[in-house]
Image (tube, helix red, strand yellow):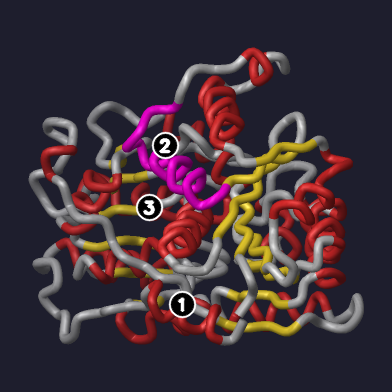
Amino acid sequence: MPAARLLDLTRSLRRAGRMATGVDRVERAYLDHFVSDELPAFGLIRTVFGYVLLDRAGMIAFRERLSGTVNWGHASVLSRLPKGRDQALIRAESDIRRLAVARCLPLRLDRMLQTHLPSDFAYFNIGHSNLTERVLQSVKSASGSIDVMIHDVIPLEHPEYQRPGTTMPFRDKLQRVRSHADRIIYNSLDTCQRAEAMMQAWGPLPRGVVAHLGASAAVPMRAELPDGLTPARPYFVVVGTIEPRKNHQFLLDIWQELGRDAPPLLICGSRGWNNEAVFARLDALPPDSPVKELPNLSDGALATLVAGSAGLLFPSHAEGFGLPPIEALQLRTRVLCNDLAVLREIIGDHASFAPVFDQELWVKTIECWKNTPPNATKESVFVGPNWADHFKTVLRLR
């Protein structure tokens, strides 16, 4: 066992005030586990001016603010100096400085780690943020080991789905991980095989471990739904950011083909990037359209819609893990998804698979499901992977 664990929480800070994505929730699961474990725990965060170190108490206080249990405090003068930044981030940075046990300028990061952490600590980077040469070398200089989670290699396999200017930085980040990490944690065997196939061209590979992510669907909370939101007739849901990889265009084409008899389709997610054609189609929908765009729903409201739907649709082109179909199955909701290897690995035959090049099969399935009660053909309950097994694998093999 390491003498202590150091969890990088930079992503969680930068996402303060926003709806949590899948990667955000994974980083927070590590935060929950590390602060509840008996091993000494610390958090490292990169701010606009340097680095902040939190002890266990600071990590717990940070978690309370992330969850909304405690409100973020007032913005400090230092955090307000860079102009044009998000107010939630400014307040969050101010708070973590007040919670810190140590702070330093970038050039003194290795000294701060050497001073405040025991030798043989383990640095965990789960959110892909702060994977810089300075951080990785500073950890090594302070006698720490490096564990990095790789969620996917989609930016390199499908650069057409990425924000402009993000593909090469991701490649550089992956090369640094291969060079410096002592171990890579993969969320699926599919991710492991794809990532290692890319990295082996750059040199020897770090040791790897495959551990499926924990998944637990939110508890449905009907009281959190806006009035009149739930359709009176069978409806379908799609969950995820509206970006090209998630393939909302495909569903809009299907609903156009279904015409007047189309069931309601609830698109639950915020608008992303590189998707102007889809945004234009959504903006042009008439008020009586069966397609509704529903951003910024609470977890309880979203779970209510998923649990009450005729099925969750998941035509994504590529995934590293795929939480929405897993969580839908845990709510005993039918799932129709693209035929991806990673989804078959994790959910097996609990979902219905149809390749997105077979639009006719999707249409037939949707037509069938809209006329049959939800879960009418369900033969077994899907349990899914859990965090206890994930950490048992990751930390036992550490």
Q: SS of the residue at dot 3?
A: strand
Give coordinates of residue 164: x percent, y percent.
Answer: 75, 42
Give the residue pinned by disc 3: 239
Foreground: disc 3 or disc 1: 1
Tag 3 near tag 2, CB within 8 Å: no
Give the residue pinned by disc 2: 65
Give the residue pinned by disc 1: 390
Residue occupying image coordinates x 73% and y 56%: 159
Foreground: disc 2 or disc 1: 2
Q: Sequence-wise, which precedes: disc 3 or disc 2? A: 2
Tag 2 near tag 1, CB within 8 Å: no
Tag 3: residue type? Val
User: Would residue 368 be visible to someone looking at this image?
Assistant: no
Q: SS of the residue at dot 2?
A: helix
Label 2 crowd bin: few (<14), some (14–19), many (20+), radius 10 Å: some
Quadrant where the C terminus is found in the figure: bottom right
Quadrant where the N terminus is found in the figure: bottom right
Residues in magenta, as a range: 55-72
